[in-house]
Structures are given as structure tokens and as C-alpha cells.
Image (cartoon, helix red, strand yellow):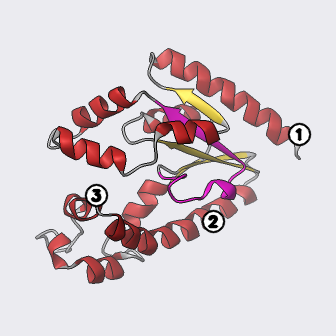
Amino acid sequence: MLTVALTGGIASGKTTVAGMFQSLGVPLIDSDLLAHQAIMPQGEAYQEVVAQFGSEILNDDNDRTINRGRLGAIVFGNSTRLQLLNSIVHPVVIRNIDALLSEYRAQGHKVVLIDIPLLYEAGKTDDFDFAILVYVPADMQKGRLLDRNKELSGAEAEVRLKAQLPIEFKVERADFVIDNSGSREQTRAQVEKVWHILCYTAERIE
């Protein structure tokens, strides 16, 4: 079974591309969703995150859920705090990814896609057979980020973008690059091309 990492900068349209792969029948593991579940009140990382970052990150609700906006304001732009958060959450996410991969392997799937936004930042490229990068130019990326998060200022958007490695670094290292700056049809054509290559490769290694 091929394990294929799907990554891309913030606001690159990675979710759209992931959906296109899913429509072709590819199982998708969403690491962002797993990370979100990990910091829910019943999640494996919840207690440690609250212990390290304090009760000010909690919502004023009965469940004492973590306010991701408040947590993000603490860690974005502060590499030490971001590394601390990642050191708590990432091991939980990796364990759950491994468990899901085992399930898909047992079900006989040939290719599984793992959505990992910070693949290169986390140094996890060697954990997967292939890496697909969703690419858009930096100016388009910033524009989409501001459109998606109306509460962000231009300066705050820059901080979030700079928290990730330069897109050029990722382009050089990806096995496949999907340019998502054009039409939806153009993106879909690239997705289908990559899918055919992956299917051919999976059949060859059986």
C-alpha cells in the first residue's frame, strides 16, 4: 500500500484538492482533524495543552473546550511556544495516523492519502512513499487567507505565512506539484494525472 502525503501552504486550496482525490475513491486521513480531536476535552492531548498554556485558552462553556483562536494567538509568531504545542499534539496525531493506516491496509486499499499541512516543517517526508504539494503563488495565498479569515489583519496574515517554510523549498522537494492557481477544471486534470501515476505505481509494487 502506498502512503501519500498531501501538503501545501495555508490557504493554498489543499482541502479542495483532497476532496478531488476522495471523489476518485482515495481514502483520506486528515491530520488537522486528528489534531483538533486531540485537544478536545476527551482528547489525549487536552490536559497537557491546558496545563502548559493555561486556563485563558479555554472557552467559557460547560465543556471547557479550547479556544483555538486564543491558542493560535499565543503560538503564532512564537517558535518556542509553537514547538511546545507541536511536541504535545504531534505524537498523538502520529499514533492515530498509524492506526488508521493499519485499518486501510487490512481493507486492501492500494493508495491512502494523508493530509499533512506541515509535512516539511515537521520533517516527516521520509515517513511516506510520495509527497504531493498543492501550490499557489504567495500573493494569491495571502489574499485567500485574508478572504477566509476576515478578522485577520494583513500583518497577522504575514505572521502566519512566515511561520511556514517558503513554498520554493517545498516545490523543490515534492514528488508531485499541483498548481491550484487556475480553474477548478485545470486543478482536477492535474489530480487525475497524479492519481493515474499512483495507481500504476501501486500495481507495479504488488
Quick check: is 130 in the magenta stretch?
Answer: yes
Q: For mark 2, what is the residue?
A: 98
Amino acid identity at mark 3? Gly
Residue 95 in the magenta stretch? The answer is no
Q: Residues within 10 Å of mark 3 (few under 14, many from 20)?
A: some
Q: Secondary structure at mark 2?
A: helix
Residue occupied by mark 3: 77
Identify the residue at horizontal 63%, vertical 65% (top origin): 98
Looking at the rendered structure, the secondary structure element under dot 1 is helix
Specify the quadrant of the image occupied by residue 173: top right
Contact check, label 1 and label 2, Cβ < 8 Å? no
* Residue 184 location (% of width, % of height): 46, 19
Residue 39 in view: no
Question: Where does the image place residue 67, in percent across and percent down from the top left?
Answer: 21, 64
Q: Amino acid at mark 2?
A: Asp
Q: Which residue is mark 1?
A: 204
Instruction: Tell me the distance, in whole angstroms, between the alpha carbons under discs 3 and 2.
Output: 30 Å
**Region rendered in magenta:** 118-135
Q: Residue at x 51, y 34 (%)?
A: 134
- Label 3 to label 1: alpha-carbon separation: 45 Å
- Residue furthest left as drawn: 60
